[in-house]
Image (spheres, grey):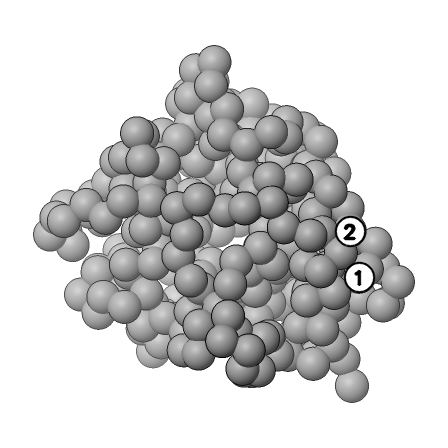
Amino acid sequence: MTYRSKIDINCDMGEAFGAWRLGETDDATLYPLITSANVAAGFHAGDPNHIDRSVQLAKQHGVGLGSHPGYGDLQGFGRRTIKAPPAELINDVIYQMGAVREFARRHGVPVQHVKLHGALAVDSAVDEALSEAFIDMLRTVDPDLPAYGMHAAVTCRIAQEKGQPYVREFYADRGYDRSGRIVFARQVARPDPQALAARVVRACQEGVVETVDGETIELPFESICFHSDTPGSLDIIKAIRKALDDAGIRVVPLPEVLAAS
C-alpha cells in the first residue's frame, strides 16, 4: 500500500533582496511545478517588490500562498541563531506574516499557511518556550491557519495538543538524523536530482527515509519540501515530478491532501 498517493509540494520563494537573488533559478519557472509557496517576508530575504511578485505568481498559477518568517538576518540568510526572548521573536513573526497577508489582500489571494524559515525553524523544533509562543500566537490570530514544519519537532506536538493545524514535511533536499530532524546546513552542495527523486518516491510509497548514518526511520508527512536556492533546483523538481507521475502519485493542492489524510 502506498503511504501517500496524493501529495503537496512546497518551495521557499521570493528569496531575493533588491537586485540580488539567492539561487540560480528564477521563481517563475518553479511555480508551475509546485502546489504551495513559502514567501520570504523581508527579514532573512525578500522585500516589498519581491513579496508582491511572489503573490502575483502564486495567484497566476493557483499555488497555495504561505508566509515564511525568519530571523532578522539578511547577511546570514536567516541561517544564524539570534538569541532573543520568545516574545520578541514572535513579534517579528507576526510582523512578517502581516506583510505577506497585506500583499495577499491586495491581490485577492488567501493565505494558506505559515512556515518558519531556516535557523528559526530548527531552533523552535527543540525549544519548548519558543514553540509554545508561536502556536499560542497562531491560536489567537488565526486558529485555522496551518503551520508547516518537521514531524520530529516539539512545535508539532504542541500544535496537535492545542488544536492548531500542522502540516508535516518531508525535506527532499536535506539530510535527516536518527531523531527524524533535518541536518541543518548553511551551505548545500549540488545534489543528484535522480537520487532525490528516488528518495521522495520511496518516502511516499513506504513512509520511510534513510538517515545520514544509513539507518532507515519512519517519517510521517503531508507535504514534500524542496528549496529554490538549492543548486539545480529546477532540475530537482522536474525529476521529482516525473518520478511521482511514473509511480502514480498525484501532486495536488494541500486541502486535497488533508482531506485524504
The residue drawn where x is 47% and y is 58% is 148
Position of the N terminus by quadrant: bottom right
Horizontally, is 128 left or right of 119 in the view?
left
Horizontally, is 32 left or right of 169 in the view?
right
Q: Are marks 2 and 1 in contact (CB under 8 Å)?
A: no
Q: Amino acid at mark 1?
A: Leu
Q: Nearer the viewer, residue 37 or 59?
A: 37
Q: Residues within 10 Å of mark 1 (few under 14, many from 20)?
A: many
Q: Amino acid at mark 2?
A: Ala
Residue 181 place in picture, x, y as percent: 42, 69
Badge number at residue 244: 1
Q: Nearer the viewer, residue 23 or 120?
A: 23
Q: Earlier in the sequence, mark 2 or mark 1?
A: 2
Residue 37 visible? The answer is no
Residue 68 place in picture, x, y as percent: 42, 43
Mark 2 vs mark 1: give the one in front: 2
Q: Residues within 10 Å of mark 2 (few under 14, many from 20)?
A: some
Which residue is under mark 2?
A: 239
Q: Secondary structure at mark 2?
A: helix
Residue 217 visible? The answer is yes
Q: Secondary structure at mark 1?
A: helix
Badge number at residue 52: none
The residue drawn where x is 27% and y is 35% is 73
